[in-house]
Amino acid sequence: MRTTIVVLGMLLATTAGAGGPPKPKPLPAGMKVIAKDNRAVVQQGALTVPLRDDDPADFDKISKVELVEGKFIEVTANRCSGALTDDVTRVPLAKVQAKLDNAAGLAAHAKKQYSTAITKFGSALQKDPETLAYATNLMAAQLLGKKTQLAAQTLAMQGRKNVIWFAWRMAVDADLAGAKALKGAQDFAATKPGTASVGKLGTKDVALSTLGGGMAALHTSKPGQPETTDIDVVSLSTGKLLARLPLTTSEDACDDTPQHPCDDAATARITERTKLADTLLASLGFEIKANVFIDVRNGDPVSRDGVRVEFSDDEITAEKNGAERTLAIAGNASAIAITPTAVIVKLNEHGGFSCTGVSSRFAGAALALP
């Protein structure tokens, strides 16, 4: 009887251990995370990439790095000169590996080793298909490596996911100049040019295009000293941010507002960016709908054109014909515009913790109607 009890106890202990959370593991061979110049960076061989996309420069000391659940890098660190202890950052391993592949691809591209660059950019895109910079990097390497059929396939397969991103990169990247001659490149321009422009697009207006499953463009900004301004373009079908076209950056404005450029060079940069945004809005067929944004900062529901929109702390719900859809948000809705296919949202988006407090910015989003 005693033997039976002991064996049963061992079995129960083993079962409980097997059913518990998996133990953290070390990072893949040769990979490490360190604090360098107060930034958390990932190193592997000769490559170094930022751990986080926002890349804050407030990491004092990294105390622990683990691979959690086999697919997340979890970094515990002290930040903000000791004001924040044991802060945890969790980033998907695949996203970091994609950054490393992309960095290797850029190094090969610079050496005109286009076959290697194609392999590395392709690997980055496979691991992180949401980051379309890898797709346009891949297409550039394919063009310069004389792989025009492959470049056309990349344009056809990846370009339809984000028409404005590809149109933007083809307009500004000299390595993509040959893309305009590819089969299907004509799909990245509207049959009839639009009349929208940055100057005509007011803060209460939205510009709409039917390309790419429907897109909306709106003015956004990041308050600060100084304030920066952009044009956000969002998808009406997926709600995702497709592109953020910069107008005034922090290096351009010397006053608290973007209306006061530092010097003639800053004025020239702003003028050039505005001209590019105007070209993209026109070529992609954007047309302005004036005075369509409704102020919703009071949080009250809005009903218009058979659509009811309600707000909570972490989501927006749209109801039409008895069906509902929700949009998860990290912030507060400032204004909305209701179109026949989607609710366009101007968010006061919480940008996460910084040493000076919680940062925020106005950003565009959309919720497709049911």
Image (cartoon, helix red, strand yellow):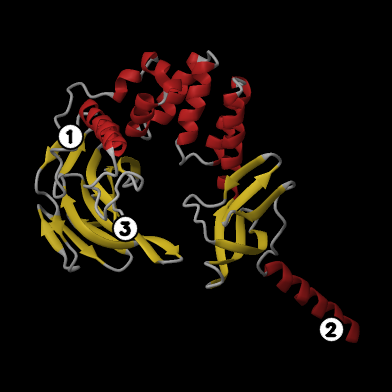
Spatial separation of the CA atoms under disc 2 and disc 3: 68 Å
**Image coordinates for residue 327, horizontal then vertical, percent:** 31, 56
Q: What element carries label 1?
A: loop
Residue placed at 23% from the left, 41% from the top? Answer: 216
Q: Residues within 10 Å of mark 2 (few under 14, many from 20)?
A: few
Can residue 149 be seen at all in this image of the molecule? yes
**Image coordinates for residue 369, horizontal then vertical, percent:** 23, 50
Q: Earlier in the sequence, mark 2 or mark 1?
A: 2
**Image coordinates for residue 197, horizontal then vertical, percent:** 17, 34
**Do callouts 3 and 1 mark residues in contact (Cβ within 8 Å)?**
no
Residue placed at 22% from the left, 57% from the top? Answer: 318
Q: In which quarter of the image is residue 302?
A: bottom left
Report the disc number at residue 307.
none
Q: Tell me: residue 262, above or below residue 90.
A: above
Closest to the camera, between mark 2 and mark 1, is 1
Closest to the camera, between mark 3 and mark 1, is 3
Can residue 325 be seen at all in this image of the molecule? no
Q: Which of marks 2 and 3 is nearer the N terminus?
A: 2
Residue placed at 79% from the left, 74% from the top? Answer: 11
Spatial separation of the CA atoms under disc 2 and disc 1: 80 Å
Q: Check disc 1 and report the residue beneath it.
A: 197
Q: Check disc 2 and report the residue beneath it.
A: 5
Q: Which of marks 3 and 1 is nearer the N terminus?
A: 1
Q: Tell me: residue 365, above or below residue 180.
A: below
Q: Check disc 3 and report the residue beneath it.
A: 224
Q: Identify residue type, mark 2.
A: Ile
Spatial separation of the CA atoms under disc 3 and disc 1: 25 Å
